[in-house]
Amino acid sequence: MFGAGGRFERIQRRTSRETVVPWFRDWARIEQEATALRWFEPVYMPGLLQTEGYARAILTGAGLFGADEIEQQVAARIDQQGVLTRDRPPLLSAVIDEHALRRRIGGAEVMREQAQHLVKLGSTLPRVRIQVVPLSAGAYAGLDGPFVIATSPSGEDVVYLDGQRHGQVIDRGDYVRQMVEVWESIRGEALSQQQSLDLMAEVAETWT
């Protein structure tokens, strides 16, 4: 109405995100400003790679939010994904466990769409790399839980740990170095980019 080019809508989405998940504010800012993100997820798809249906199914399945809260969080999550298609997007290297591809969340249609979405992103966005740790890997460093390592424009790394009802940003040098080692160990267990894309496409066909 005011001819603001969507500015008020963006403010509303940002306000909703801060109201629903106030502990996420610091990380949301870091994520948006990062030049690189190294993201490992053993259970779910990384938030920046989730479809709307998958995100909604996760939030609904938790049973902790009302309908309005779910829609606000889904909108905030989709809004965050704009970082991948902006000018000068960060380099996103995501590693997921094969279990995350095969765990039924929201039904077969949701899972098929999600797997196909991963293939599309990994195939069409040059700064997105998605790899999968296969079930055959057995025990490996990633089983201790998810994390993200973000690189700031100044070149400094911070680690984000996502908990049940909170998140924590850690910039302590010794801890960050340890997590970089963990990341490298996990990457060593993952399939190549092309092998991972092939596996994701194959899994998508199993969700019928």
Image: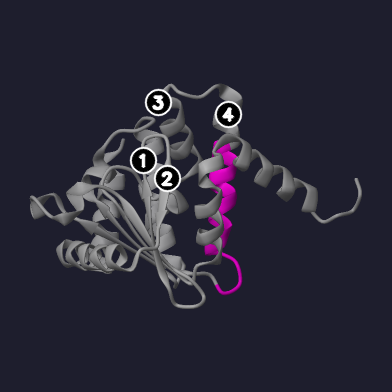
The dot on residue 167 is 2
Q: In which quadrant is the C terminus drawn?
A: top left
Kindly state the secondary structure of the residue where label 2 is placed: strand
Residue nearest the observer in this picture, 92 or 163? 163
User: Is 78 covered by the magenta stretch?
Assistant: yes
x and y, in percent, of residue 11 in the image? 73, 48
- By secondary structure, the bulk of the magenta-drawn segment is best described as helix
Task: Give the residue type that dot 2 points to.
Answer: Gly
Circle 3 sits on which residue?
61
- Mark 4 or mark 1, which has the lower sequence index? 4
Numbered marks: total: 4
Q: State whether residue 76 is above or below residue 201.
A: above
Kindly state the secondary structure of the residue where label 1 is placed: loop
The dot on residue 69 is 4
User: Is 36 covered by the magenta stretch?
Assistant: no
Task: Give the residue type that dot 3 points to.
Answer: Gly
- Mark 1 or mark 3, which has the lower sequence index? 3
- Mark 2 or mark 3, which has the lower sequence index? 3
The dot on residue 163 is 1
